[in-house]
Image: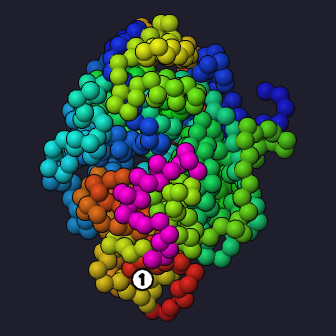
Amino acid sequence: MAGPLTLYDKIIDRHRIMSLGAGVQGREERLLLYVDRTVLNEYTSPQAFSGLREAGRKVWRPQAALGVVDHVNSTAANRTDVVEDKGAQGQMDYFARNGRDFGIEMFDVQDPRQGIEHVVLPELGWVLPGMVIAAGDSHTTTYGAFGAVGFGIGTSDVEHLLATQTLPYTCLKRMRARFEGPLPVGVTAKDLIMTLIRKIGADGAAGHALEFAGEAIDALEVEGRMTICNMAVECGARVALMAADEKVFAYIAGRPRSPSSAMLAEAQKTWADMRTDKGAVFDREIVIQAAQVAPMVSWGTSPDQAGAIDDVVPDPKAVAADKRAGVVRALEYMDLAPGTPLSDIRIDRAFIGSCTNARLSDLRDAARILRGRRVAPGVRAMISPGSSSVRREAEAEGLDRVFVEAGFEWRRSGCSMCLAMNDDVLAPGERCASSTNRNFEGRQGTGGRTHLMSPAMVAAAAVTGRLTDVRTLKLLKA
Amino acid sequence: MEKFVSVKGVACPIPNANVDTDVIMPKQFLKGIDRSGLAQGLFHNLRFDERGNARKDFILNKPATQDSRFLVVGPNFGCGSSREHAVWGMLQYGIRAIIGTSFAGIFADNAANNGLLLVTLSASEIAALFDAIGPTGCEILVDLEAQVINAGDLSIAFSVDADRRTALLDGLDRIGGTLRHADSIRSFEAEYLKASPWLCDRIDA
């Protein structure tokens, strides 16, 4: 390839086995793509393994796959290998059997390495710059924080990947979002990505690989960058990317599965070129001034239906005609009146968890607000750490005591009430301040109402009983 | 997968933007280890109330549209979760094609891998199709061979990626197709891993 290239083009080019011709309606190349690694979960993989069995096929490279139970498991402190839900039990049992039969390492709920897949892989040191990682979960975009192409696939493609270590792939268009200037005090990675999603819409990056750049991104730690890449799928991006830097190299070093230091030194010579060249052309560019970003909360049933905490619930009559019907429907489902200040919205539940925002830095952010405070009367609050490892690290710092003293339930790890496939569920009509990624109708429970925000904002809402600008709460000493 | 050549049937309008896969196939239908039982799950929380009774006001519960073969939909259809159950449920319900202006990427791949035809039209074409089928839907013809939709007097040409069209028309085994290139994959892999040995460190036993 000649001329300046984007990071996305460089990574795809290194994984091109052969061209398969022109793509959809003659646009973009189709190719057979080599995939470095995958992660499997118990709910999107079973039919893929059944397909392999029916066709008598093996897994091409079993050591390039890792499985972790996360979606259906209990987060109760005293959980065991057995759950009441027969379907969930069947999925966990079949998952373990598939690991044994196909030679793939699987972490069950009692494994000390268990956790949400997109939290577990990075903390193991399994995600490296320049990789292609495809997996049966839409939030596989998270790995972009490491300069890796990560994307979600369905179960049929999981089967294809397991059988061949490849995917037939249509190249995406390239888009870049730049966050210029430093991040204001009290504003987090979650607020940056929610601001972008609101600006460009739930399909704003559809069909694109979305690269993030700019001073505010460079200033973030790796965990905050994961939050941004994770949620990029909520504006339609199939792939999210950030150039790997010294922070990423330092994050990777010394983890249980990361390469030895001699190997890492060798690898870094290659990784140094894993960034977009000066002058590379993007199909679309967006610039956001970080100084203008405020703490965000969603008010609707699509992640782009959100505003700064000092905004009001919009009036459908005042929004663009093509968005009006969606706003009317969302406000009806959310039981919100136009013009209501977002900070007047009272909550019943508070949830900190998910692959978006349940890493150690997220828990520290929440604990900072909760120290010396109590959850408001009538609010049920819970925290499910992103992984069992995060849970141990938080306990070693004493964060669990802060949460429990504040009145939060300190739970075990899993996807939990982000999508409520286990027994962590909102009752119909319940309203939840949530550090998760999707506010879809019924996502956290049939009839449940979700307001997305950062972990610190969830903590603030939990103690006041209503959506609250975290910047107005003074830090207290315990 | 069932072949798709030319199909006639009722088209049901669902014009909402950003219809997500949580709404298409709610969580309570994701607990299987096979693909069965998903017709009941399709749009379940919109089709049925808490007691399991059909909600009469939902479009797919109206007599004219309950046997729909096509959905005509708003933008960004199928966004959100990667759950292929959404596509399996569509096919089990009897939906053969979905016609809209844009589809979420993972949903579109899942549809292609299962023989659910997605037809992408321009905003003006989809507006004309919504007009033609009306708020309660009506019978249309979707011809993949000729790449044309007929709805009453309205006729709209469309195009589908050649690979996907062939797969839909002939019902190909994708994995078998790729494994025909097994030697190329193997030699690429050997060279690639040799050039990037850190990818094997602590992974290969």
Which quadrant holds residue A84? bottom left
Decide if residue A193 is in sight here: no
Q: Residue at x 20, y 48 (%)?
A: B49
Q: Position of residue A49 (x, y in %)?
A: 32, 30
Q: Residue at x 28, y 40 (%)?
A: B58
Give SS at disc 1: helix
Instruction: Check residue A440 for magenta coloring.
Output: no
Q: Position of residue B192 (x, y in %)?
A: 63, 29
Magenta stretch secondary structure, dominant: helix
Which quadrant holds residue A471? bottom right
Instruction: Check residue A331 for magenta coloring.
Output: yes
Crowding around mark 1 (Cα neighbors within 10 Å: few <14, some 14 to 19, many 20+) is some
Q: Position of residue A373 (x, y in %)?
A: 42, 88
Assign the N terminus of chain A to one quadrant of the image.
top right
Please state if A7 lies on the left or on the right of A463 as rendered.
right
Q: Residue at x 38, y 33 (%)?
A: B135
Q: Which residue is mark 1?
A: A464
**Label 1 sits on what residue type?**
Thr
Q: Numbered disc 1: what chain?
A: A
Q: Position of residue A190 (x, y in %)?
A: 56, 63
Decide if residue B46 is in sight here: yes
